Image: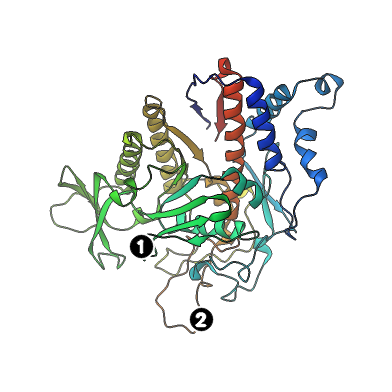
Amino acid sequence: MKLHFPRNQTTQRTPKIVLLISFTLFLLSIISLNCPYPKNISLPSKSSSSSFSNNISPSNDQDDDQKSVPDQIKDFFNARKSCDIFSGEWVPNPEAPYYTNTTCWAIHEHQNCMKYGRPDSEFLKWKWKPYGCDLPVFNPAQFLEIMRGKSLAFVGDSVARNQMQSLICLISRIVYPEDVSYTSNEIFKRWLYKSHNFTLAMFWTPHLVRSKQADHNGPTNTGLFNLYLDEFDEEWTTQIDDFDYVILSSGHWFFRPMVFYEDGQVVGCKYCLLENVTDMPMYYGYKKAFRTAFKVINSLKNYNGITYLRTFAPSHFENGLWNEGGNCVRTRPFRSSETRLEDVNLELYMIQLEELKIAEGEGRKTGKKFRLLDTTQATLLRPDGHPSRYGHWPHENVTLYNDCVHWCLPGPIDTWNDFFLEMLKMEGIESYQEKLYPVANDRKMKFR
């Protein structure tokens, strides 16, 4: 399924030669769209700066050599956008990983699998290979240059934090950020990369809408939560106005018992076991929560950033549920022919696509931009990437279940940031094309 996201027309009349010079400098500054950052962290050689021009044209014919740079860029863009980077297979990558638990301090203890004795390391040595094209390995120098003077917010739960910490670790190969958080609360963090004036933030909102814990234990000893499905969560909605990019996600907290409120009244619940309250499927609350989250984004007059929906990341419990001894002990990825998206995972994924499409339609009226960061298929194929029991020492007196929800760092989740960087690069080329060729503003990016 491919979603087509129209871009907003622009009336800017910047001279083409100025745009061409500006974009050429931009391309040189990010070195190469196809050159992965070397493991030894040395800067690319001068010859690598030509890799973009060497690969920008689909062939080496004389006619292509005679094309103008803007036309070559257009050909390159058309070739890249025709490839669905989210459909593919995992292939061996002996060069990975690109950081370790000893070189990055940002890894959450419960995802620090190698520190806590995970015996195998082969799960680290894979990369995502889209059908018909390549996905470059994350290049921290490119990323920081693209993000110069900009800001990025992760909005969601602990899996969103997992991705943010992956990003910090990937960038840590060249620089670490400063903690500039405005609160001591660890679930609301803000970091600054001074060298590039790039701000990175995390806003904790496990249900996206306003919620509160009504009972610490609840029917399953995981708490009972009141969800106010038509009310904004101001912990993040009042904070994102100045951000250039927002990555929105949510999922696993909706498996817990919940009571649904609308217009201040109880309308039902998901396994709350309360008298005279109708039991409803979790999908009801999930759909409503995303609709409300997108509604508030579209209503923010001062927010002009791009919103990315990071799709649901399936867990991989086998031989039991999470609280019934289920575990994830595989040591290799699945092939796409060995599993498929189905049942609850498929339903949650489809709800996200449907709500994003609705939000994009509404956002078009006010110039809001939405993109689909579709990590679901690649994540589904990585049952080997979870911490399992390697998120603490065996002798520690802690009550923790096998973790088949979060992701080891380093690990498969690093690829989510490969996806994100590739989308940023395509966004930059597309923006350039819109200004250089205003009549072509009806082109649409195709990201599955």
Task: Work out how far the residue at label 2 is from the one at label 1, CA to CA, in angstroms.
Answer: 33 Å
Task: Indicate the quadrant containing the C terminus: top left, top right, bottom left or bottom right.
Answer: top right
> Which callout, 2 or 1, points at the residue further toward the start of the chain?
1
Q: Nearer the viewer, mark 2 or mark 1?
A: 1
Residue to which mark 2 is pinned: 394
Q: Is residue 354 visible?
A: yes
Q: Is residue 271 visible?
A: no
Q: What is the quadrant of residue 367 in the picture?
A: top left
Q: Amino acid at mark 2?
A: Pro
Instruction: Report x, y in % for residue 39.
Output: 73, 59
Q: Sort mark 2 into few (<14), some (14-19) or many (20+) by Cα contacts within 10 Å.
A: few
- Could you tell whether 357 is left or right of 89 in the image? left
Q: What is the quadrant of residue 96 in the picture?
A: bottom right
Which residue is located at x 49 percent, y 36 percent?
Answer: 371
Residue to which mark 1 is pinned: 183
Instruction: Report x, y in % for residue 137.
Output: 68, 49
Which residue is located at x 37 percent, y 42 percent?
Answer: 241
- Could you tell whether 146 is left or right of 252 in the image? right
- Could you tell whether 114 is left or right of 406 in the image? right
Q: Amino acid at mark 1?
A: Thr
